[in-house]
Image (cartoon, coloured by chain):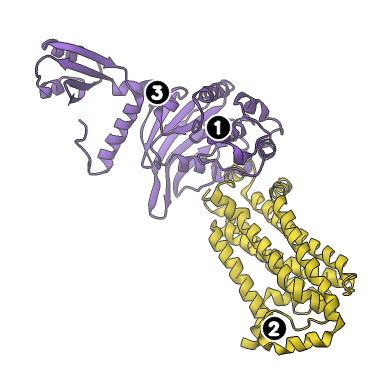
Amino acid sequence: MSQGPIVLEDLRKSYGKVEALRGLTLQVSAGEVYGFIGPNGAGKTTTMRILLDVLRPSGGTARVLGVDPREGGADLRARIGYLPGELAMEERSDVGPWLDYQMRIHRASPGAWRPYAERLGLDPSRRIRDLSRGNKQKVGLARAFAHEPELLVLDEPTGGLDPLMQQEFYAMVREAVGRGQTVFLSSHVMSELEQVAERVGVIWEGRMIAEAPLEELRGSIGTRFTVRFDSAVDLDELARVSGVNGVQQVGDLVELDHTGSPDALLKTLAAHTVSHVRAEPPDLEDAVLQLYRRADGDSATGADEGSRA
Amino acid sequence: MIVSIMLRWLRTHRAGLLGWSAGLIGVTSMYLPFYTTVALDPELMDQYMSALPPEVVSAFGFDDITSPGGYVHSTVFGLLGLVLVLIAGITRGVRAIAGDEQTGSLETEVTAAVDRRDVYIGRALGVTVFVVILGLVTGVATALISGPSGLDLPLDRVAAGVAALTLLGVVHALIALAVGAATGRSSIALGVAVVAAVLGYFAHNLGPMIAEGIERFSPFYWAYGNRPLSEGFDWGGLGLLLILTVVAFVAGLVTFPRRDLGV
């Protein structure tokens, strides 16, 4: 197949005057785990609902498994496993019968959900109403995975899961990819994607502001140096050193955000008396926050600039 | 797939179905046995009625309370039983699409391998069957109590009354369903269906006093204008009810697949 399982071009969606998506373009390739990250309200859920034909785009095009979701209908959705972001189920039903019904309307055999429920430690005899948020999420995950669809669309899949179950979920994702399935999952927390996503797209106010393999994204933010000098130093001088993106004084420490080769910085530091230095690996959460801030500065008039170098 | 969706919907509403059935059996078995006292002295009852202002008598459909058919109509089919069937039908119709859309539970069905049209048809059938069962329960209870209460209503008259009651309930339930399916708003669906029912009810019972012929536009007149419990099946009226039911059903069928779902 020349086209990836998800191809979105200049996708737009407005609700009245509110623009939820402002020209979103992204491609997910077959067999990859694509992490879709953005703050709440950035348009992640709207995008996923367009893929499932719950919402219709106001402009642009969407292709899912080579088909326009508006045309694909039931046959297309039989090939997708979807976990809604705000999962709501028939509260009065028991887990088992509800999942049996879900299998029927997903064209799977009635018991197909059982292995997943077992893995996730889900008791099928419980009433859905009595389940905790995490257990409800397990029901939703079993529903999405059980028919082994070509494409999994998972909206905030780890929400409510304890760390142990999160690991189990990551294992399920890896196995799915091993079978050739494609996974498109969203989160507003980078740490949840870090473990499984191969590529990450960052969405901000309905637009993609960055898209890169995880490693590249990690490299783009570089390293944070924390340095204590024995005597006062000229911060501006440090800021001029090549590779330094920001400098700030925190108490008696100086923090430097740095990308690229550290050679020039180290040589500059060597001219001073340094009593402490720490170089931290890039924190992706920070990286994404920086991306948001940059995007915010670009789109807005820079209202809260200066709060951070 | 449509059948699966319908059965699933009915399954989740079986507790409600039992509750409403019990209510209808209760209403029927409490009112109808009192006919023995009415039948003992029909003139006394007529005097009571003539003491009331004629508008009140009409508004509640008490015009013919001393005949068996008139009594069953005035107490159950035209009053409390009717109110129960309408409330049950309208609330089911409101919830079947718009209500579940607002709680979010519709999302797990429309995102599965079913067409949105099938979701609508399956749930519309579920609502219809729900109301039909309530109508049949009322009919069976009426038929069983009819003899011991001295009503001795012929079965075909009971069947005619059940057909009218049921279709009246289905019409309003499907109006609620269709408006909910078209708008996704349960408040609008409930409002439209209730206003339709209230206007229809009073146009039938009080309309002629306000404007000549206005009752002919009321589904309640189509159902009960020719007194099916006394006179038997009124095929013309039932036909009109059926047409309105189909119109409401199609209106939802056409609009529901076209819009965004606020799930």
> The residue tagged with tag 1: helix, strand or loop?
strand
Is disc 2 in the same subunit as disc 1?
no
Measured as percent of width and height from the top left, residue A57 is found at 47, 47
Three-letter amino acid code of the residue under disc 1: Leu
Q: Chain of mark 1?
A: A
User: Residue A257 falls in which quadrant of the image?
Assistant: top left
Residue on which the image places disc 1:
A152
Task: Say what secondary structure mark 2 lies in.
Answer: helix
Q: Chain of mark 2?
A: B
Q: Please state, as top left, top right, bottom left or bottom right, where the N terminus of chain A lies in the image.
A: top right
What is the crowding at mark 2: few (fewer than 14 residues within 10 Å), some, or many (at least 20)? some
Location of the C terminus of chain A by quadrant is top left
- Residues under numbered marks 2 and 1 in contact, where contact means CB atoms less than 8 Å apart: no
Percent position of residue B240, x then y: 72, 72
State the residue in front, B212 or B118.
Answer: B212
Q: Is residue A2 visible?
A: no
Q: Quadrant of residue A229?
A: top left
Mark 1 and mark 3 lie on one chain; the one further toward the N terminus is 1
Given the image, on which type of amino acid does mark 2 rest? Ser
Residue matched to label 2: B58
Q: Is residue A248 left or right of residue B32?
A: left
Contact check, label 2 and label 3, Cβ < 8 Å: no
Which chain, by letter, is yellow?
B
Callout 1 crowding tier (Cα within 10 Å): few <14, some 14–19, many ≥20: many
Q: Secondary structure at mark 3?
A: helix
Disc 2 or disc 1, which is closer to the eye?
2
Output the letter for the chain in purple. Answer: A
| Image position, residue B226 (x, y; %) | 78, 79
Alpha-carbon distance for marks 2 and 1?
62 Å
Q: Is residue A49 left or right of residue A102?
A: left
Q: Is residue A176 left or right of residue B77?
A: left
